[in-house]
């Protein structure tokens, strides 16, 4: 097995993770839209400039969190476990998506839950 340079490890990581970022973002967007739809028409009242800015902030933070896979991928790809890692890193992707989806679900529920004063 030949040694892989850091540059090659970074290139391999980008090739693997960046196409999957689209899947990650589609899943998270789908969750938010689902809870928006389930709470409609009450959720319509949450839409404002501040709300859109909050969604933007959360989307950026979700994508920063997605980048946590890069240091792990680069480190393992540069090791002697590169071949095993290539076969099983989809598990890390799946766990990451499920984790982010869980967090997104709770945030979306909180964003679109009717105010206590609206229930009474």
Image: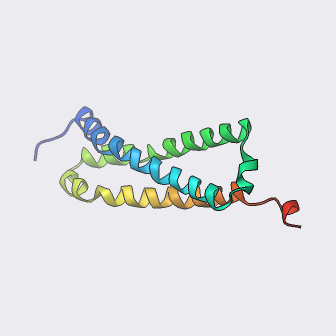
Give how far across and how far down residue 47 sits, in percent: 71, 44
Give how far across and how far down residue 59 sits, in percent: 56, 43
Residues 28 and 35: in front is 35
Q: Residue furthest left?
A: 1
Horizontally, residue 57 falls left or right of residue 20, namely: right
Give how far across and how far down residue 102 sits, in percent: 54, 61
Residues 44 and 48: in front is 44
Horizontally, residue 47 falls left or right of residue 27, namely: right
| Residue in view at x 70 percent, y 42 percent | 51
Residues 98 and 2: in front is 98
Is residue 61 shown above or below 101? above
Q: Residue furthest front?
A: 41
Is residue 69 shown above or below 60? below
Give how far across and how far down residue 105 sits, in percent: 59, 60
Query: By what rule are the colours in the image chosen?
Result: rainbow
Residues 120 and 89: in front is 120
| Residue in view at x 85 percent, y 61 percent | 118
- Which quadrant is the C terminus positioned in? bottom right
| Residue in view at x 35 percent, y 41 percent | 18
Q: How many numbered discs sit on the rendered protein? A: 0
Q: Residue furthest top?
A: 7
Is residue 95 shown above or below 18? below
Horizontally, residue 22 falls left or right of residue 56, namely: left
């Amino acid at each position: 097995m030949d040694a892989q340079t850091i540059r090659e490890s970074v290139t391999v990581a980008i090739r693997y993770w960046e196409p999957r970022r689209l899947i990650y973002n589609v899943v998270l967007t789908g969750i938010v839209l689902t809870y928006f739809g389930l709470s409609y028409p009450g959720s319509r009242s949450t839409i404002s400039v501040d709300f859109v800015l909050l969604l933007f902030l959360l989307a950026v933070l979700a994508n920063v969190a997605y980048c946590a896979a890069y240091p792990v991928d680069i480190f393992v790809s540069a090791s002697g476990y590169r071949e095993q890692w290539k076969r099983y890193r989809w598990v890390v992707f799946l766990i990451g998506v499920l984790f982010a989806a869980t967090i997104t679900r709770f945030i979306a529920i909180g964003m679109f839950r009717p105010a206590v004063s609206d229930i009474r």
